[in-house]
Image (spheres, rainbow, N blue to C red):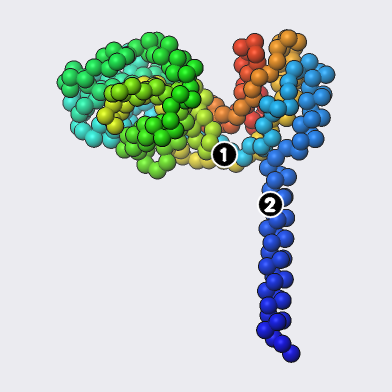
Amino acid sequence: MNTKKIKTAIIVLLVLANTFFIYNLYTLNIKTSRIPHQMIDDAVTVLNRSGLNISKDIIPDIRPQNFIYEGVYSHSPETFEEIVKYLSESEISTINPMPNGMSYNAGEYKFDFSGTEDSENYFLVSISFDSSEQGYTSVYGDGYAYEDLETKVGDLILKGLKDYKKMDIAKAENVIANFLKKYQPGTVDFETIGFEKNAENEYLVIRQKLDGLAFNSHIVFVEISDRKVYRFIGKWYFGAFAERYKMPLLDSVNILFKCLERDGNVIEDSEKLENIELYYGIVWHEMDKFYLIPSWRLKFDSGRDLSYIAVIGK
């Protein structure tokens, strides 16, 4: 008996069996993680007949698998002071109360935290290089007001990223990530949605993310000079998360039928759905506690935006 040939044959059979097993797992994962194209085609036919003007090309076929996160935003002075000390890498020199917030000076930076009485604005922060001490002047002016930034942020988002090299954007993002890691160890997740640079400075608009999903309305304007963050102004969550939960989430097709059921009477026949995207919405359930919940946003060419929580479709 040629035992060597028998062993070889057995090994080949085992390899083939493993390959078949892996292939079956892969195809099963594809079937469970994606919506079948035929289902999307059928849904679009029914939705269009029912008055929801939509093209199948904009419907995501990935079924959402994201977690629900429970976070705590403590707007106590102790929390603010901890953030200030880590990011400035210095002791606090001055503390000043301001309407619905606190202001601090530490090292080279000035920190303003807003929203101590309004949960909608709990996450507002303005971190600025103290140019009065350092002799630094920004191209956009020495001071920023939140309302003044709306035009700048809008312009940068409109310009997008297409006029600049990916390497330049990546270098600027690395500066931001290293700055934030002083307080947020581990992965700092965000995406750049606007970029501009000149000989001295770089200007970015970034959106905070978690597990690949953007936070609702958490957009920050960042100014960088000489590989240092000089301005960081907008909404940002600096904290960790106490818990995370896995729950079944409605996919894009199901949420479209929910939209038709709940809001079909307010959508005009002339309105066309332009985009459907998944994001993290913030739902408060106590004064300092909130949930990050996967939600769907539907954008129409009329400017109408409709949002639905992916857990229940409301």
Q: Note whether 227 is above or below 145 in the view shown.
A: below
Q: Earlier in the sequence, mark 1 or mark 2?
A: 2
Residue 220 appears at what percent x and percent y?
Answer: 41, 23
Residue 154 appears at what percent x and percent y?
Answer: 46, 15
Q: Which residue is drawn at the image coordinates 70% and 12% (left, top)?
A: 271
Comparing 2 with 138, the one in front is 2
The label number, if any, that marks residue 26 in the structure image: 2
Q: Note whether 4 is above or below 267 in the view shown.
A: below
Residue 123 image-quadrant placement: top left
Residue 28 shows up from this direction: yes
Tally of numbered tags: 2
Comparing 273 with 13, the one in front is 13
Foreground: disc 1 or disc 2:
2
Label 1: how many Cα within 10 Å (few below 14, some 14–19, many 20+): some
Relative to residue 230, is residue 213 drawn left or right? right
**What is the spatial separation of the Cα atoms under label 1 and label 2, in whole angstroms?**
22 Å
Q: Which residue is drawn at the image coordinates 64% and 22% (left, top)?
A: 275
Secondary element under disc 2, as helix, strand or loop, is: helix
Q: Quadrant of the C terminus?
A: top right
Relative to residue 280, is residue 313 drawn left or right? right
Residue 36 appears at what percent x and percent y?
Answer: 76, 38
Q: In which quarter of the image is the N terminus?
A: bottom right
Q: Name the residue under label 1.
A: 67
